[in-house]
Image (cartoon, grey):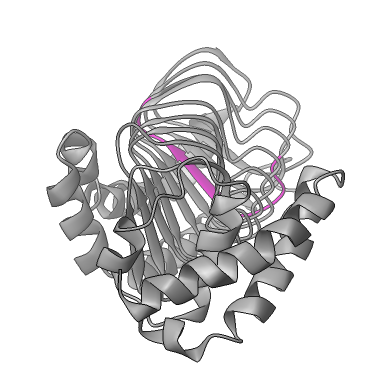
């Protein structure tokens, strides 16, 4: 054990009693307050700054109370760029920084993965919520999750495999589904862009803004929206979108949107090949992708306004 890992252990031993004292708080207050305390304590150990991935792997945080929050602070406050491994904890990736990444490999079990994140997260394991209230960055679910991007305010959320909800109550950003959503895509969303190229039960119910385009399969689409643009170009059993006129007005832009989305469709086939998926994710220009999609959204929205009774 080197001096860095000894300092990490010392910092954790100093922090963990504080975490335990806060354990009666609700989950989110516990996460925020104990994270701030972890940042303060880690700052007292300057030798931790040069921590490496090998240092993390040499330590066993598997059953350590609050390990996810402590690891989040370690990642954000040091030179370490990525945490990559099998994790079993509650809060991991809390306030993840813009130039930071977490890869939760198969076998991981994380309740909240990437809450308030602005970084890059890839989940191959089992998660409760991935990207809760995320602000920016990229979240990719290549495993199973209860929800992806719940109450998020920015960034890109992509579901490749299985989730119950994606983009629920989101306010901005981009949601793309290539996989299977057992319940709903973008319920109660109020801004941003949502695209379905996979399967979902319900899509764009009670939305109040943004753009929803179905290229895939859904049981029900665009139930009781109060704003935004909803367009169906896929297979829907109960379609409330009245898409015909909107499709004619926006055909060129929809084709461009589909073409742009096909750039990342390779992710779908890479879902079972973690190393290749990660290589694609790290090399792709996600900011340029988001800008182009957002530009198309503005053009589609403008064209749809010409359709009678649309876009509130």
List x then y, in percent, for residue 241.
60, 28
At x 76%, y 50%, the residue is 20
In the displayed structure, 312 sits above or below 120; it is above
Q: Is residue 50 left or right of residue 63?
A: left
Picture quadrant of residue 282 = bottom left
Whether 270 is among the magenta residues is: no
List x then y, in percent, for residue 279.
16, 59
At x 49%, y 66%, the residue is 9
At x 69%, y 42%, the residue is 189
Q: Quadrant of the N terminus?
A: bottom left
Whether 197 is among the magenta residues is: yes
List x then y, in percent, for residue 217.
40, 19
Looking at this view, name the residue that lies furthest to the bottom: 46
Q: Is residue 180 left or right of residue 30?
A: left
Q: Nearer the viewer, residue 173 or 273?
A: 273
- Main SS class of the magenta portion in the image: loop
Q: Is residue 75 visible?
A: no
Q: What range is drawn magenta here?
A: 189-198
Q: Is residue 70 visible?
A: yes
In the displayed structure, 75 sits above or below 303; it is below
Picture quadrant of residue 32 = bottom right
Q: Nearer the viewer, residue 299 or 189?
A: 189
Instruction: Count the numbered circles shown.
Output: 0
In the displayed structure, 238 sits above or below 89; it is above
At x 69%, y 23%, the residue is 223
List x then y, in percent, for residue 144.
42, 28
């Amino acid at each position: 054990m080197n001096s860095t890992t000894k300092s990490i252990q010392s910092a954790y031993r100093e922090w963990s009693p504080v975490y335990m004292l806060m354990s009666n708080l609700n989950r989110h207050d516990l996460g925020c307050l104990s994270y701030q305390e972890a940042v303060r304590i880690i700052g007292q150990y300057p030798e931790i700054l040069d921590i490496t991935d090998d240092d993390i792997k040499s330590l066993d945080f598997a059953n350590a109370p609050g390990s996810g929050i402590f690891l989040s602070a370690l990642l954000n406050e040091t030179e370490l760029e990525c945490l990559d491994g099998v994790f079993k904890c509650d809060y991991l990736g809390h306030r993840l920084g813009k130039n930071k990444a977490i890869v939760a490999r198969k076998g991981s079990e994380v309740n909240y993965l990437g809450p308030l994140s602005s970084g890059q997260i890839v989940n191959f394991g089992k998660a409760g919520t991935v990207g809760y209230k995320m602000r920016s960055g990229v979240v990719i679910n290549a495993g199973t999750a209860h929800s992806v991007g719940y109450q998020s305010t920015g960034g890109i959320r992509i579901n490749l495999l299985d989730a119950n909800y994606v983009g629920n109550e989101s306010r901005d950003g981009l949601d793309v589904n290539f996989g299977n959503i057992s319940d709903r895509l973008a319920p109660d969303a109020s801004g941003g862009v949502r695209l379905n190229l996979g399967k979902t039960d319900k899509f764009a119910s009670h939305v109040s803004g943004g753009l929803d385009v179905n290229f895939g399969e859904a049981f029900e689409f665009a139930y009781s929206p109060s704003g935004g643009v909803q367009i169906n170009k896929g297979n829907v059993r109960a379609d409330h979108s009245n898409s015909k006129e909107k499709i004619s007005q926006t055909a060129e832009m929809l084709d461009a949107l589909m073409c742009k989305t096909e750039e990342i469709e390779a992710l779908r086939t890479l879902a079972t090949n973690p190393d290749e998926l990660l290589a694609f994710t790290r090399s792709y220009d996600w900011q340029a992708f988001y800008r182009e999609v957002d530009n198309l959204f503005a053009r589609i929205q403008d064209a749809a306004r010409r359709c009678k009774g649309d876009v509130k």
